[in-house]
Amino acid sequence: MKKIDAVIFDLDGVIVDTAVFHYQAWKRLAHELGFDLTPEQNEHLKGVSRIESLEIVLEIGRINHLTQKKKEEIATKKNDWYRENILKMTPDDILPGVSDFLGKLKKANYKIAIGSSSKNAGTILERIGYSSYFDAVVDGTKINYSKPDPEVFIKAANLLKANPKNCIVFEDAAAGIEAANNAGMKSIGVGSPDVLYKANIVIPDLRNLDISIFDNLIEH
């Protein structure tokens, strides 16, 4: 009997690559505030909420005098810059291997969901033509706590009516892998083993991926 019956995907960096858009917007904001943001520093922003990301950016720039109102104002500005780019997205922006692998999951009757901290998930899914493709979508508008808190994945499992122990999460961020592990789920990291070392398995991307990879995650 199949022991894995639900698969939850992070969106940014797994289904589509919007990381570059985030980085461009955060870097632009950093420059406006008088400092630079390196690609290495940007890694710490992946998988966490917008406000938490802003706090990290401000800490990097050693800026600690902003009011809460000002923080919300510049976080909104960053998001506006980011949205300018994602509104230009098309199905061509879906990462290699994703459509093929999702098709395999559908054919094998796995339940699939999106579990993302992004508040723009709905817009992105609409732009790439996947707005009604997933059985459930939990994004930043539906959660109180961002990754590494497991809330987003637990909510997705509940919507899928799946036991967390029978769920697999695909994630590209260390915070997301930690969230999956905290939820009691199996985790597959998409990206660098150096960053995603807490995942059960790490793969470079979804190209030529087969469902048989799940066999390595099932406890005997």
Image: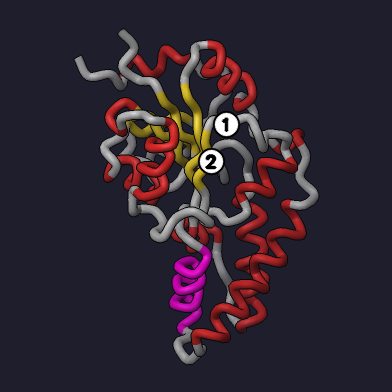
Q: Nearer the viewer, residue 140 or 49?
A: 140
Kindly state the secondary structure of the residue where label 1 is placed. Answer: loop
Q: What residue is shown at x 57% (from left), y 23% (from top)?
A: 102
Task: Provide the residue span drawn in magenta.
Answer: 50-62
Q: Position of residue 47 (x, y in %)?
A: 46, 53
**Residue at the limit of the structure toward the top, as seen here:** 1
Residue annotated with mark 1:
134
Q: Which residue is mark 2?
A: 137
Residue drawn where x is 55% and y is 17% of the image: 106
Q: Residue 2 in magenta?
A: no
Q: How many marks?
A: 2
176 left or right of 23?
left
Identify the image quadrant of the C terminus: top left
Are there few (<14), some (14-19), or many (20+) residues within 10 Å of tag 1? some
Q: Position of residue 206 (x, y in %)?
A: 54, 26
Is 58 in the magenta?
yes
Q: Mark 2 is on which residue type?
A: Val
In the foreground, 196 or 159: 159
- Do the CB atoms of the residues marked 1 and 2 lie less than 8 Å apart? yes
